Amino acid sequence: MTDLTERLPVPEQRPRTPLTGPIAWARANLFSSVPNTIVTLVVVWLVASAVPPVIRWAVLDATWSAATGKDCRSDGACWAFIGEKLRFILFGRFPYDEHWRPLVVVMIFIAMILASCDRRLWSARRLGLMWLTGLAAVGVLMWGGVLGMSYVETDLWNGLPLTLILAVVGMVVAFPLAILLALGRRSRLPAVRALCVAYIEIIRGVPLITVLFMASVMLPLFLPTGVTIDKLLRAQVAFILFSAAYLAENVRGGLQAIPRGQYEAADTLGLSYWQRTRLIVLPQALALVIPPLVNTFIGAFKDTSLVLIIGLFDLLGTANAALTDANWRGFFVEDYLFTAAIYFTFCFFMSRYSQMLEREFNKGRRR
Amino acid sequence: MTDTAEQRTATAPSQSVITLQGVHKWYGEFHVLKDINLDVQKGEKIVVCGPSGSGKSTMIRCINRLEEHQRGRIVVAGIELTADLKNIEAIRREVGMVFQQFNLFPHLTVLENLTLAPIWVRKLPKKDAEETARYYLQRVRIPEQADKYPGQLSGGQQQRVAIARSLCMKPEIMLFDEPTSALDPEMIKEVLDVMIQLAEEGMTMVCVTHEMGFARTVADTMVFMDRGEIVERAPPTDFFANPRSERTKLFLSQILAH
């Protein structure tokens, strides 16, 4: 034992091969074994063969301005098409001179969504107030008829504003409905439970297109002659009903995951059913299911493109219509890429927002 | 303990705060509570012990309607326990419960856990509720944890917060369902100390526990349950020294072996 105390301390040395830094990372992750190395080389080859042609097509050989479609025929992309058709893709047949109105509407939506990220606004009253005034402003701007703005019927609400209205109003109304459905499905009252189960299962059993068709084609058959319900309203209601069923199942998953002890503790403290649901169960349940909820929201946002079937022209509808111009034929790649980029921007933002929400709401819990 | 019990019965007329008469409960076909008769006086401390599956937790959970009894009568704080929601809520306001798994609300801070029920059930203004909450946090000796989340506390601290949370509603009766069974040995003492202090201040307590040392210190009456029935009921000195039933003797030999 005395040997140990008389030994000299081991001098500090550097590792013979580096453990940190880019070379070390490459060794560990890309070239750590023979299969890994082979996969790395294959991927590098794929990237090298795919990316340069794309860059050549999209940037190097692209035409950025042209007078007509014929001038734009080159090997590269024709971004002049987008420049020419931009206002049509974004706003559709909304009166050309009043395009500032749908533009402001889009900005209001973006502003409201960004503002909802701010913690300081997170009381039910402030959020509710902000969204109500925002949506009221949207309504006034789109319909017009007041303050010197001309009246624009809902048929002419096209493009991005229509997509945003359908998606945002749809989600905002469907979400509380979904919570009620999920609670109802777990209720001990048989009538309530049967109704909620029937609603959810029937709606989930049919495609969204069917629900849209029913709303737009079949509903007028049942109404007395002369009575019409606005087509946009019908589509909006169809969306709300459809989204609510899917969101309800997401919420129910969260409700089931709350341990019984939470319910029991709330009961023993004397909380009523609604107090318990609002203060204890829902905050925990909703925080748990943020990933599937946002998943459903993102899906619903893109499902709005189905309204093309019933004759409403949302963003994808106007993008399609832009291709029918005789002077600018065949630029569908540029058109769809541009539209996809817009969808991607919104959906990506929703995804980042959800990650922020998850971090925020799971602070006090298991990390 | 016995002379204080005598003093109590001599000075105060019997005030039954909990009465169970002929209570039976079935889970489907399984008869889990068989003819339970129990009387708890105000200020009395009852410790219920018995092997697992004997129905001890079920019995005390029937008292605040976390479980429903199928036959018999339960009267708590003068209110009859029936299916009537108003009665159930009135009883639950007077009965506090501490669980084996603490059941704190993880999305709220300790202070919010404590003030939630006084604000929403007793309709106290926030300031008063917070004052009461800080007072009871002081009583359970963790005033500095007020702004932490339950996930950041140790088991013993969490259980003490749970006790404080029940106390903030100023209940007449406290029920404890194996409060220390989920704790590490070092933390058991801090929780038992709080419960002993509570007992000394005159709280009516019904406690299901395996801690026999605690039972000897605090209990006025020991209740032994086995297979759904109350087998023996006696003050702790008689219970531990001269158990009358064979089943009690067997249980005590197992539990006091180490």
Image (tube, rainbow, N blue to C red):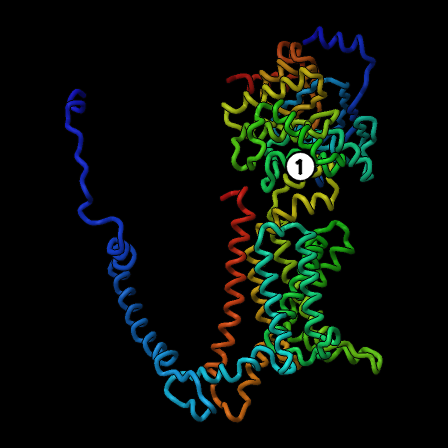
Q: Quadrant of residue A139?
A: bottom right
State the quadrant of the N terminus of chain B: top right
A166 above or below B49? below
Name the residue rendered at 80%, 20% in the picture.
B16
Q: Nearer the viewer, residue A233 or A151?
A: A151
Q: Amino acid at mark 1?
A: Ala
Query: Residue B54 appears at what percent x and percent y?
Result: 65, 28
A280 above or below B162? below
Label 1 resides on the chain identified as A
Q: In this figure, which residue is indicated by the disc labeled 1?
A: A265
* SS for callout 1: helix
Name the residue rendered at 64%, 63% in the picture.
A171
Query: Residue A97 appears at what percent x and percent y?
Result: 63, 82
Name the residue rendered at 35%, 80% in the picture.
A60
Q: Quadrant of residue A163?
A: bottom right
Q: Is residue B53 visible?
A: no
Around disc 1, counting alpha carbons within 10 Å, would you say few (fewer than 14), some (14 to 19), or many (20 or more)? many
